[in-house]
Image (cartoon, rainbow, N blue to C red):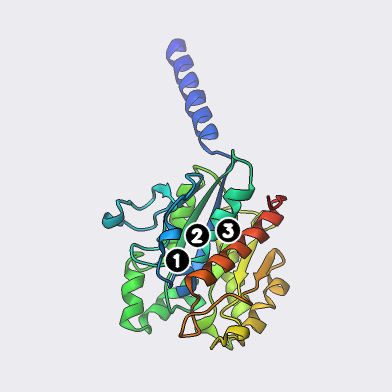
Amino acid sequence: MKIKHFIFIVFVLVIGEKNVFSQNPNFYIFLCLGQSNMEGNARIEPQDTIDVDERFQVMSTIDCSDLEREKGNWYTAVPPLCRCRTGLTPADYFGRTLVENLPENVTIGVINVAVGGCKIELFDKTNYQNYVETSPDWLKNMVKEYDGNPYRRLVEMAKAAQKDGVIKGILLHQGESNTGDTLWPQKVKLVYDNLMTDLKLNPDDVPLLAGEVVNADQEGKCAGMNQIIATLPEVIPNSYVIPSSGCPSAHDHLHFTAEGYRILGKRYGEKMLSLLGGKLN
């Protein structure tokens, strides 16, 4: 019996050690959520698919047979980074900026759950069903790709990712569908606080970066929302607003062009780099 007991203890210690060391502290993971601009609206161009560093990874949040990706697995972050047929997103050049400017032993991973046209209410874990039930069919169909609950899918993927690395921040781009809603910052805080609780994260260690919608200098149709987005740091202390001025918009003045996403994504990356204590090379 003593021998069996000894073997059992050794087994537990070995397994425990394996679990401890399977999480790489130099694997920085970032959660991305929002509506169509985070989902990616611009067509992916050839320059966006070449020379993607393997240190920049994306976790697929759904199964994409055409891309040979399975839900919950990591892949080199060649766009699309959201669903199977989405476009270029700020997350693309966010990750590239970090990889280019952080030490070579650091890997960047992004997890992108976004639904075009959605209000922030879609990510309210308690009341999302009421919102979905009154949504148009096209939005319901996108929500179905996340088994009807995008917030739950984001948390599910984030928990899986925590076995591999450390969540270092959250990227948000949303607001067009909440234009004029002065309660938007509080609604974002509810989502942020729920993520902190459900993923056992410390808000002091996990900044939230929120991008402006298409700016007035690009004739943005929802540019007035930027005044509300600007108040977010008053509600969430560890949050920062990423300016969209000078980021070219598409003809609809709601979305960015591919170049606009590249510029905006780089700004997200530069801000996060400064928060991580890094410097531009």
Report the Cα–Cα distance between label 2 and label 1: 7 Å
Q: Residues within 10 Å of mark 3 (few under 14, many from 20)?
A: few
Rendered residue at 54%/60% (across/down):
93
Q: Amino acid at mark 1?
A: Leu
> Nearer the N terminus, badge 3 or badge 2?
2
Using residue 134 as the reference point, say whether residue 6 is left or right of it: right
Q: Which residue is mark 3?
A: 197
Figure label count: 3
**The image quarter in which residue 219 lies:** bottom right
Q: Which residue is mark 1?
A: 88
Q: Residues within 10 Å of mark 2 (few under 14, many from 20)?
A: many
Quadrant location, the N terminus: top left
Residue 167 in view, yes or no: no
Coordinates of residue 30 in the picture (x, y in percent): 55, 55
Above or below, 107 against 201 in this view is above
Q: Nearer the viewer, residue 49 or 254?
A: 49
Q: Which residue is mark 2?
A: 92
Secondary structure of the residue carrying numbered label 2 = helix
Q: Are marks 2 and 1 in contact (CB under 8 Å)?
A: yes
> Nearer the N terminus, badge 1 or badge 3?
1
Coordinates of residue 6 in the picture (x, y in percent): 48, 15
Q: Nearer the viewer, residue 235 or 130?
A: 235
Q: Amino acid at mark 2?
A: Asp
Q: Residues within 10 Å of mark 1 (few under 14, many from 20)?
A: many
